[in-house]
Image: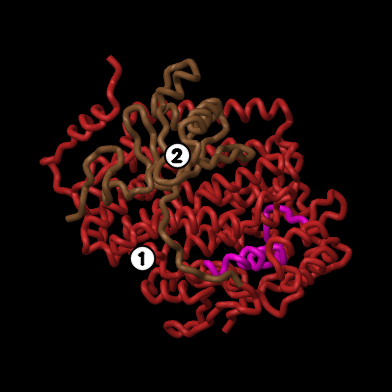
Amino acid sequence: MPRNLVQAHEKVKGLEWEPTYCLPEVKYPTRFHIPKKAKDPFRHLIRDYMAMETEKDNRQYGFLDGAVRMDNPNQIEPRFAEALKPALAILPFAEYAAGKCQGMLISAVDNQELRQGYLAQMLDEIRHTQQEIYLGRYYMKHYADPAGFDIGQKGFGSQLLASAGRAFFETFVAGDPIECSFSLQVVGETAFTNPLFVAFPNTAAANGDHATPTVFLSIQSDESRHMANGYATLVTMLSDDRNLPLIQEAVDKYFWRGHIFIDAFLGALTDYFSVHRIDAYKNLWQQWIIEDWVGSYIARLEKFGLKAPRWLPHAQQNIAWMNHSAAIAAFALWPLSFWRYDVMTEKDFAWFEQYYPGWYSHYGKFWEEYRRMADPREGQIPAMLFDKLPPLCQVCQMPCVFPRQDISTVRVVEKDGNKRAFCSEACEWMFDLEPLRYVGYTNWYEKFDGRDLAEVVLELGYVRPDGKTLIAQPHLNPEHMWTIDDIRRLHYEIKNPLRQ
Amino acid sequence: MTEEKKVAARDTVGLVLMGSEEADVAVEILQEERPDLRITKTNCYYMIEGEGKIEIDVNQVGERLGRALDVPSFLVVMSSYYGRAQVEEQKFGVYAELLQLEENPTGGRPAGRS
């Protein structure tokens, strides 16, 4: 007789027992009050879960095997291939942190039904770490310019802007375990994985990359269950009124943290590394974040006392410009990367002006200069166009360039006797809530202050196997590649803009 | 600068099915039974959106495919959704209601608040 899923799930829940041979140990204390009653909408059972994941892996790895035979890795637009180098370097850390978060939740949440979902998620996160590293390996082995894929994990650890990714993803695993669940499952996975693992693959496919959609859509099929884990955790916490202010604070904090990193990073990859664009990132954001996450989810919770994230209006102001400002911060210091950039053409200019009216007046001159400076014989990098580098936010570690240079929300203030920069009112608010969490962070500029750019590039290992040619290049042209000698000739000193 | 505005709550739900034979059949059935749904085929997935709820009878999908299909096997191609998801014996659904907080449209008992 076939097994009944609903009945089997009910039966498995009944197998829980309270151990009498040891005292329960609180490993991860929480401020939240955790009710006993909870539901897992996906009714996870390990036997079904294993069969499902095996099928997913068979389909994904089967495709990748066949794709190599068809030389699919070299049908990708070279500009888009470069986007995968940072993306596939940063994401495994997020997955690993997400897996650790499940360990914290299993320990902290005394509810068998939720724990079953967390357990499956922990296994998922390990799977995702392997999938993303495998996808990087796939391109490293088979793509025409593998430099950068080979040092992704090492490169990520010390890259200027990747520090911001690490700072955000650490919120999955640092602090109160229920807050980590909100950062990861309610905000990160329910709001931001859709632009990343659904919309971005659509752009990837348009740019000749069929491996990333295959892997990312498979990952996202697990994220769907993680969204349900987040929802189950949220409604469970919401059923005790004492938790409401804590839930609100968590949603306020982590929506902003997700927005400031993911929207800048993914927005820049989507708009500046595509040749064939599906839509502007700000429109994808409007669809997936505002309409679907806020409109169909968070706004419906208002009658239960939860308000929309406090900083949502600031994010709505940011979104039209922030990825352009982030792109300039990244492209200006291109030698400090382990991927290549491309020049923006007249066709790109027209697209930007069409989708972001006013773009040329704010950014056009930079991109014209960038194009000129792409040739090493010019002897300049675009960072030289600016008097000083933008400071890094003490909370999110993003360069303080948002939403746009002329209307920047940066604030440099004295905190405990030190000059600190914040990209926004929201990040300063977060610092004041938990200063000890952020004061000890030594940022990238502080580590490399006063050093020559060439020395730093060598120390970070961002050179190709010939020991001279940089991994990063400001263009995709196989001719006129920059070498470390070109960088030495610049005599460009890294200066911490907050140097006392 | 983008204008900020309050975001109103809505009943719209959505489902993303990755391109596959299961998705082709599920979409075929939904087009027959729910002509109100908005279904878009992108480069690599179907985006299915509608008001209130979207439910997929996995038995029916299996019958048209000519092989047995259970819910976990169908979830292999269910990439994403927005709304509240719920797994039943032979059905996968996404609902506008806040399951456990509001009335449960699948007939289960709402958890209610303490």
Check the image and tell me how it is coloured: by chain
Q: Is residue A252 left or right of residue A374?
A: left
**Magenta stretch contains residue A335:** yes
Q: Nearer the viewer, residue A108 or A196?
A: A196
Numbered range of the magenta stretch: A316-342
Q: Please tell me whether mark 2 or mark 1 is closer to you in this view.
A: 1
Q: Earlier in the sequence, mark 2 or mark 1?
A: 2
Circle 1 residues within 10 Å: few <14, some 14–19, many ≥20:
some
Q: Position of residue B28 (x, y in %)?
A: 53, 29
Q: In the displayed structure, would residue B84 be above or below residue A421?
A: above
Image quadrant for the C terminus of chain A?
Answer: bottom right
Which residue is at the front of the view, A103 or A237?
A: A237
Query: Residue at coordinates 42% horizontally, 32% vertically from top-left?
Result: B56
Amino acid under label 2?
A: Asp
Are the numbered discs 2 and 1 placed on the same chain, yes or no?
yes
Chain for numbered disc 2: A
Residue found at x 65% / y 36%: A210
Q: Amino acid at mark 1?
A: Lys
- Provide the secondary structure element on which disc 2 rests: helix
Residue beneath disc 1: A307
Chain A hue? red
Q: Along the line of sight, which residue is nearer the eye, A138 or A267?
A: A267
Q: Which residue is mark 2?
A: A222
Residue A380 percent across, percent down from the top left: 81, 69
Residue beneath the point at 48% across and 32% down: B30
For the stretch drawn in magenta, what is the main secondary structure? Answer: helix
